[in-house]
Image (tube, rainbow, N blue to C red):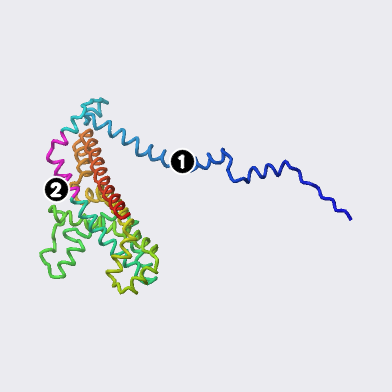
Amino acid sequence: MTVQTERPPSGPTEVLTTLEGPGEPPARGRAAALAPYLLLLPPVAVTVLFLGWPMVKNALLSFQNLNMRQLIQHLTEWNGVDNYLEILGSSDFWRVTGRSIAFTGVNVVLIMVLGTLVGLLLARLGRRMRVTLLIGLVLAWAMPVIAATTVYQWLFAARFGVVNWVLDKAGFHSMAEYNWTGSQLSTFFVITVLIVWQSIPFVAINLYAATTTIPKELYEAASLDGAGAWKSFTSVTLPYLRPFLFATVFLEVIWVFKAFAQVFAINQGGPDRLTEILPVYAFVEGVGNQHYGMGAAISLLTILILLGMTSYYLRIVLKQGEDEL
């Protein structure tokens, strides 16, 4: 008995072999290489449109003498770098700059310390308590800035504020009608409490998520070696959390440094402009005093100062990373 077999046509097989070969076709390789850039194109375009163009317009305004008269008459009066020279020669600008840096440093330190403690607490709580605390943190984090600021204005109100009432009932009768926005330090205290309260959830949740990536075997090995709670934290937890801490500090510096809404809404930079930070100072000089070119110049200098601070911080972080390697 003879069994005849037909030889399959060679054409399709050759095509299939070509497509399934070890190398991809050049067209497909180029498309795969361009895919990430094509995906980035829409957000980059939106960022340039909504952030880049206003930045360019603001830079142009900073080289103009622009006040109400120029706005009404539609005049463009270029004055070169006169705005920058006047600002840099002003003692008020440098006083506000130093105040802004100190304000940012104090707030970031408090935020990172308290946020880290809460994040570590989340890692040690049971499931029910952890979920309850997470819900509270998310609700505090999700509250709009102006709404939270209004609540704190009510809490620290002189006559009917809850804080003064509690202090009075606790025996501090001199605080019954204390004006928290009447002095520089007390106003900054209220603003700092507000900003720290708003920022702790982000740090705590971020650090708690980072703790979930730490292998449990490392803690078991540290326990077998006789390490206590502090030794386990410094030798196991902290090395794993260090990259997250660096990134979180970077973000918090930016967020606190530009905290315009909280400072302005609490007391508009008062009393006597003693609590102005650079964003508030730019707004008061620009919009409040109707020197729009001056305000634009201050805002650009604020961005440059922030870039200088963050670049210096990143250089320190990168240097520490190289030393560890």
Residue at x 25%, y 38% (from the top left corner): 300
Residue at (23, 44) in percent of width and height:
279
Q: Residue furthest front?
A: 1
79, above or below 180, in the image: above
**Residue flagged by tag 2: what amino acid is it?**
Leu
- The image quadrant where one finds the C terminus is bottom left
Residue identifier under label 1: 37
Q: Which mark is residue 186?
A: none
- Please give the residue where the numbered disc 2 appears in the rendered image: 274
Label 2 vs label 1, nearer the camera: 1
Q: Quadrant of residue 187?
A: bottom left
Q: Find the magenta span and give its range.
A: 86-101
Residue 79 in the image: state x and y as whole percent. Answer: 20, 26
Crowdedness near tag 2: few (<14), some (14–19) or many (≥20) residues, C-alpha within 10 Å: some
**Relative to the observer, which residue lies in front, 75 or 234?**
234
Judged by its main secondary structure, the magenta piece is helix
